[in-house]
Amino acid sequence: MRRSDERILTTHVGSLVRPAELVEALRAEQLGQDYNVADFERSLTPAVAEAVRQQVEAGIDIVDDGEYGKVAWTQYVVERLGGIEHRDADPTTMRGGALVSKDRQDFSAYYAVYDRLSSTMWLPPDLASRVGDASFARLGRWFCVAPITYRGRHAIERDIANLKAALAAIQGPVTEAFLPLAAPASVEASVPNQHYPSDEAYVYALADALREEYLAVIDAGLLLQVDDAFIPYNYDRLLAQGLSMVEYRKHCQMRIEAVNYALRGIPEDRVRYHICWGSWAGPHTSDVPLKDIVDLVLKVQAQAYSVEAANPRHEYEWKVWREVKLPDGKILIPGVITHSTNVVEHPETIAERIERYAAVVGRENVLAGADCGFAQGWNMARTHPSVQWAKLQALARGAHLASERLWGTRTAHV
């Protein structure tokens, strides 16, 4: 994995706003409905090529496929795992399509409005009218109802091939490329267990299946990013159930061990591990502090750790790294732009954020990233697509400014 040896390298978390030509097929897949797979895949290849081109043009060094082939960052498993079944959402365990949490209890009036508006907010009006209500409450959920099996070889090979073809078409070098895939614990939370006798048995069954895709990405020569937002987010959910910090950390420990089980034998320098506190634009007053979980995060067998660091709730947490030593050889990918607002960060602000992290962990150990993805699914766009690209351009410009200051020399203009 490349480090920032000569300048601050840039990347992001992975998911980008899906193009309109892909949305209706992705919606049908999420609902378990029939759609023209061949037409979808013919549209997917040029869409990924365009996403990669735009990332490179924006100044991003370490790029991905935008997760364009996935219905959502965890729910893409609906086409890749056997043993799961689509059912209507259960109103006793879900509110507005999302699992009940302390934040949702405290701000129920806010979420009553937000859930109704957010799912189609940035879709073109004609497309929004065709797909109708895109909230998870209306779309329902997938549940594990039988032994988990893996059947996703075609889908992962398709995603790998599309990314590699897009990289080959780029005029000029691309530093590196990655594919994001979900962690066992995050799939567990998105696809509830109604079959296995225990949480642990289910999580490890998922780890065995997901490992198939992890290995495929590594064997293809790409970087693997393991997305595990539910490690922090589960605190908000479990807090609503009255669990203590001790119980929450025990909950996380088993799931961190399952990640490492899925990663066994994979070189750490090919792996990035991403956490966030949930991508929606909510109050987030019940988020677990990074200081209370950072030791667990650093147990994951990855070289790079991607964390939220730019939004108003977590920007202060750069100070955690004053007290917690980043282990030798590791890399930190702090979010220095955020998905949580459509305000485009000024490059000077971005540069200052980068410089703070460089001061505490070393400039060569910092990659400039984003808090979270810009669209965790076809119906979860967090910013307007035009704003998404403006933010990535600002990220590159901020990294350019920080590099000039940190190395004391001029870098190539972005």
Image (cartoon, rainbow, N blue to C red):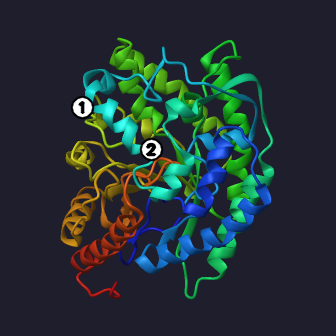
Relative to the observer, which residue lies in front, 39 or 280?
39
Disc 1 vs disc 2: Cβ atoms closer than 8 Å? no
Callout 1 amino acid: Thr
- Which of the two discs, 1 and 2, sits closer to the camera? 2
Res. 271 mark: none
Report if residue 201 is visible in the image. Answer: yes
Where residue 74 appears, as percent x and y from the top left, is 58, 41
Q: Which residue is mark 2?
A: 119
The residue carrying pointer 1 sits among few (fewer than 14), some (14 to 19) or many (20 or more) residues within 10 Å by Cα, namely: few
- Location of the C terminus by quadrant is bottom left
Horizontal side, residue 208 vs residue 294: left or right: right
Q: Which residue is mark 1?
A: 285
The residue carrying pointer 2 sits among few (fewer than 14), some (14 to 19) or many (20 or more) residues within 10 Å by Cα, namely: many
Horizontal side, residue 47 vs residue 324: left or right: right
Q: Look at the picture and state if 263 lies above or below 216.
A: above
Where residue 2 appears, as percent x and y from the top left, is 50, 68
The quadrant where residue 58 appears: bottom left
> N-terminal of the two: label 1 or label 2?
2
Where residue 69 appears, as percent x and y from the top left, is 64, 56
Q: Secondary structure at mark 1?
A: loop
Spatial separation of the CA atoms under disc 1 and disc 2: 22 Å
At 31% from the left and 66% from the top, the residue drawn is: 363
At 49% from the left and 51% from the top, the residue drawn is: 128
Callout 2 amino acid: Ser
At 80% from the left and 42% from the top, the residue drawn is: 151
At 38% from the left and 78% from the top, the residue drawn is: 6
